[in-house]
Amino acid sequence: MSFETISVIGLGYIGLPTAAMFASHKKKVIGVDINQDAVNTINRGQIHIVEPDLDKLVHTAVNEGYLRATTTPEPADAFLIAVPTPFLPTENDSDIPEPDLKFIEAAANAIAPVLKTGNLVILESTSPVGATEKMAEWLALARTDLTFPQSTGEASDIRIAHCPERVLPGHVIRELVENDRVIGGLTGKCSQAAVELYEIFVQADCVITNARTAEMAKLTENSCRDVQIAFANELSIICDKLDIDVWELISLANRHPRINILQPGPGVGGHCIAVDPWFIVSKTPDEAKIIHTARIVNDSKPVWMIDKVKMAIADFLLSNPNKTAKDITISCYGLAFKPDIDDLRESPAVFITQSIAQMHVGTVLAVEPNVDHIPKTLEAIELVSFEYASNNADIQLLLVDHKQFKLRAPTQGVIIDAKGIWS
Ligand code: SAJ
């Protein structure tokens, strides 16, 4: 098959780097997004997200005429759908979140009118098991004049596959090229076509399976990490109770040749690890016991951190009877969802800092070396320098192990260290 024109639907953290990657291999790429501002930004050769090296790639691709963004799908040889798969709203905190496929359905309906015989449609969005088959049904309903693999098998006009992205934010450009790719076609020909497409830029193995296994593979990877982090987070709570340094404990245990415990933290953030396990739990609630429990353990860690701060406030007032809570300044170090990035979305550090600012009557300061302003939703929090925060706080709360924080620690105040770098 020849893929000269490739369309990427959804120009976010995965879609835009993928589009730029095809374009940098001299393929004509049509990027499609419902966000007109993002489309305008990309067509100026700029980017609306933060990812190292992506700006140069997009700038060159647009300037050389290989990448163009639009809000309306156009005919192409292959379509890659990389749209979000959020949750449906839940009524109670204890409800299991259900995935919402509305963006995949909208993308399928948007490309359906321009589909033609020989096209390949790939779902890249992280999806619950069965979503690719569902997408194929939506496409078939919209285009009764074409044949699809779910009904016609290998002879279908349209080929469909699920090929989940697995790249690490902050390393996307390198990992897009170097990571093995799981290719789950609805038929063998669908898989083969998808392998040919990814081989345009992927230098690692493109491993063929079926669509359901490919969907489950992605969910399994992120659930595995979530379970492992939950183990570390649970250990940190146990060790706190038993007066044991969890960091020392983990480094000792990790000297065993077959043990590799991850690091505890303030909770699990980001858009993947804290989300994807629910796609398994919601489908198989009676079976997914460990995966479900890991979510509960990790989601409860930020609340545990806030309780630690409340205890530190109470202790401070006990040993300083002439002071009130209003006199206590709390500095929070790090707002991003993980070290050395500027992404504050779905960040436990933001949740903790915001909750402390809401409950505490005294001053709450924040230090985040990777951003220069605080988003509007966090206006109650004052962004200050490390020096100011460390010199003025009574309680010093380390939330993210950014490299800047590894170089120095506050020399006064009570330290609460969620990452074990100042302990
Ligand atoms: N975290 C810990 N302790 C650790 C490691 C991580 O508390 O020892 C926390 C981080 O601070 C962060 C969260 O977990 O809040 C998630 O960070 P991460 O680095 O584990 O993962 P993400 O969300 O940046 O990217 C993950 C990756 N998946 C795996 O490593 C299995 C990436 O490969 C996926 O492509 C990405 O999810 C995705 O898009 O699904």
Image: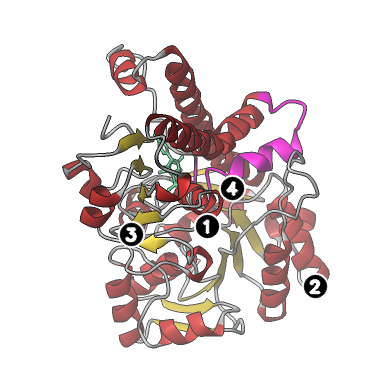
Kind of residue at badge 1: Ala
Q: What element does badge 4 sit on?
A: strand
Mark found first going from the N terminus, 3 or 4 = 3
Q: Residues within 10 Å of mark 2 (few under 14, many from 20)?
A: some
Q: Residues within 10 Å of mark 4 (few under 14, many from 20)?
A: many
Q: What is the C-alpha distance between the residues marked 3 and 4?
A: 22 Å
Q: What is the C-alpha distance between the residues marked 2 and 3?
A: 35 Å
Q: Residues within 10 Å of mark 3 (few under 14, many from 20)?
A: many
Measured from the top left, where is residue 198 in percent x and y?
44, 58
Quarter of the image for the C terminus: give it.
top left
Q: Name the residue tied to disc 2.
A: 142
Is residue 159 or residue 260 the one in the foreground?
260
Measured from the top left, where is residue 413 in percent x and y?
29, 39
Q: What is the C-alpha distance between the residues marked 2 and 1?
A: 22 Å
Please identify, in this view, whether the residue under mark 3 or under mark 4 is nearer the observer.
Answer: 3
Mark found first going from the N terminus, 1 or 3 = 3
Q: What element does badge 2 sit on?
A: helix
Kind of residue at badge 2: Ala
Res 136 visible: yes
Indicate if the residue with disc 3 has its beta carbon within 8 Å of ligand 1.
no
Answer yes or no: do the residues labelled 4 and 2 have beta carbons within 8 Å?
Answer: no
Q: Is residue 380 above or below residue 192?
A: below
Q: What element does badge 1 sit on?
A: helix
Mark found first going from the N terminus, 4 or 2 = 2
Image side of residue 137 versus residue 199, left or right: right
Disc sitting over residue 194 in the figure: 1
Q: Name the residue tied to disc 3.
A: 173
Disc sitting over residue 184 in the figure: 4
Q: Range of the magenta residues?
A: 268-289
Residue at 24% across, 56% down: 388
Magenta-span inclusion, residue 380: no
